[in-house]
Image: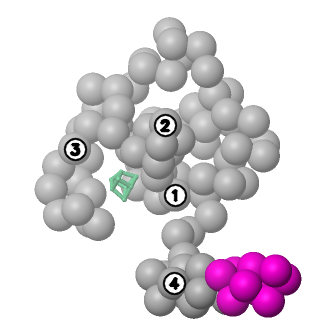
Amino acid sequence: MAKSQCDAFDDLEGYCRILGHHLRFSYCRSCQEGFPCFKILDCWFEKFDVRKFVEENFTAAEIEQFLRPPKPKMQTLMTLIQQAQKRMKDR
Ligand code: SF4
């Protein structure tokens, strides 16, 4: 991502319904280990062309990855248990 393009909207502020307070776009575009929040398109489309921002700064594969909603914690836990059981079986 080119620095000049990616930080152009960093100072815009919005209310985050997940965290319950206002924050800057700089957080939203990088809060998933450097990639945007999965809600970025929903939260910012009224303030600027966030879809264009995303398409210009990330690859199609990256976009598909970070727009995927996070798995519920219980589902993640079950998946980890199943993977561990499979590893034990395969030994
Ligand atoms: S994009 Fe994510 S972190 Fe940013 S305001 Fe929306 S829900 Fe909150």
Please name the residue that numbered disc 2 is placed on: 34
Q: Residue 1, relative to residue 33: is it above or below? A: above
Neighbor class of circle 4 (other Cα within 10 Å; few <14, some 14-19, many 20+) is few
As helix, strand or loop, the secondary structure at mark 3 comes to: strand
Q: Label 2 vs label 4: CA separation?
A: 24 Å
- Give whichever of discs 2 and 4 has the lower sequence position: 2
Q: Label 1 vs label 4: CA separation?
A: 20 Å
- Give whichever of discs 1 and 3 has the lower sequence position: 3
Amino acid type, mark 2: Gly
- Give whichever of discs 3 and 4 has the lower sequence position: 3
Please name the residue that numbered disc 3 is placed on: 23
Neighbor class of circle 1 (other Cα within 10 Å; few <14, some 14-19, many 20+) is many
Q: Of tags 2 and 4, which is closer to the observer?
A: 4
- Give whichever of discs 1 and 4 has the lower sequence position: 1
Verify whether residue 89 appears in magenta.
yes
Using the image, tell me which numbered label, if any, was put on residue 90: none
Q: Residue 7, relative to residue 48: is it above or below? A: above
Q: Magenta stretch: give its range.
A: 83-91
Q: Label 1 vs label 3: CA separation?
A: 16 Å
Amino acid type, mark 1: Phe
Q: Residue furthest top?
A: 4
Amino acid type, mark 3: Leu
Amino acid type, mark 4: Leu
Q: Label 1 vs label 2: CA separation?
A: 12 Å
Please name the residue that numbered disc 1 is placed on: 38
Label 1, ligand 1: CB separation under 8 Å: yes
